[in-house]
Image (cartoon, rainbow, N blue to C red):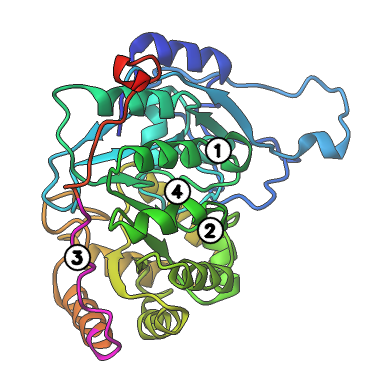
Amino acid sequence: MIIIGLLQVFALCSIFPTMTEDATLPHDLRLRARGAVSNAVGRFEAHGVNYEADGWDRDEEERVLRTQVSEERPRRIISYNRSPDLPFDRSINPYRGCEHGCVYCFARPSHAYLGLSPGLDFETRLIARPEAPLRLEAELRAPSYRVAPIAIGTNTDPYQPVEREYAITRRCLEVLSRFNHPVAVVTKGTLIERDLDILSEMAARGLARVGVSVTTLDDRLARLLEPRAPSPARRLAVIRRLSDAGVPVRVMVSPVVPGLSDHEIEAILEAAREAGAGAASWIMLRLPREVSGLFQEWLAAHYPDRAGRVMNRLREMHGGKNYSADWHRRMRGEGVFARMIARRFDLAARRMGLDAGQGDLRCDLFEVPLARGDQMALF
């Protein structure tokens, strides 16, 4: 995650006012296709402001919670990490916040750094970074830069609906293609099909692969968990189109939700294999910081009969806590249930031929192209 400067934070806070301290929402506000059911103030905000109705009636249509987008101009776009749990050390995130509204999203707490709520603000108050491709090119041209695969979509989805208007992800891919730079994309968005021309050509050079997240095959559960993300069937169709275009695809059974979706592991793997996936991975549901409260509110609203079972399973895997961020354990948990899920996944993946790795992306082709105005461009 990239932390923006204090001046940028203050600017964003002036655009997006803070929410109420007690997360109370207007009773007539319609949360059409939203994941979170509350909007608690961010953890870095010392005070909240309570807004009361002024008595004037409003048309019903005006009470729909709509998506707003502001813009940020970052000084740097490549974010580096040293996490032993991740297979990459650098990433790009064209957007902050995600309109897909997945209630379990581990990136929700990052919105608190902007003075916004990890709840409804995360999925309705988005930040676009239109200058990201320019910053990316500048960083790749730096004499000190050393090539390694860049991951796109590790925090928020690079192919969420706002990408249709901004095309930031596509322009970043164009930069990476010109530099022969390896890239791994993670998404559940169908808009990635628009960029098959770039991805297929890069894949032919050993420079690109894609991971597609499939959490469940149950349409109702998917609509509640991921209200504005494509349906499970549509994501499988994306896997097929990518595979047919020669792009290596990994299905990500992520997250596995104990008590809600864990019984679907084998079915998801089989459906993904039939669609053309060549590899598979999984991650257990994670509830860092504010995500824990948001997910428990969601359970109480939609699955009150299973809430106790789901949370008990999670606590079993994290030493009695809702979540533990310890290295090497945070992604999958520990204990009997975690080992059972891992064993089931391994057996099913091996049986379906999805257990082999995808191989390394090529780094030896990286080359800084001539910039406009370079003397050598005259020859």
* Quarter containing the C terminus: top left
Residue 294: image tag:
4
Q: Secondary structure at mark 1?
A: loop
Q: Which residue is mark 3?
A: 359
Residue 226: image tag:
2
Choose the circle earlier in sequence order: 3 or 1. Answer: 1
Q: Which residue is mark 1?
A: 167
Does residue 97 appear in this view? no
Q: Main secondary structure of the magenta part?
A: loop
Q: Secondary structure at mark 4?
A: helix
Cα distance, mark 3 to mark 4? 37 Å
Q: Amino acid at mark 2?
A: Glu
Cα distance, mark 4 to mark 2? 13 Å
Q: Amino acid at mark 3?
A: Gly
Placement of 88 over or under 134, stated as above or below: below
Residue 206: horizontal and vertical position, in percent?
28, 58
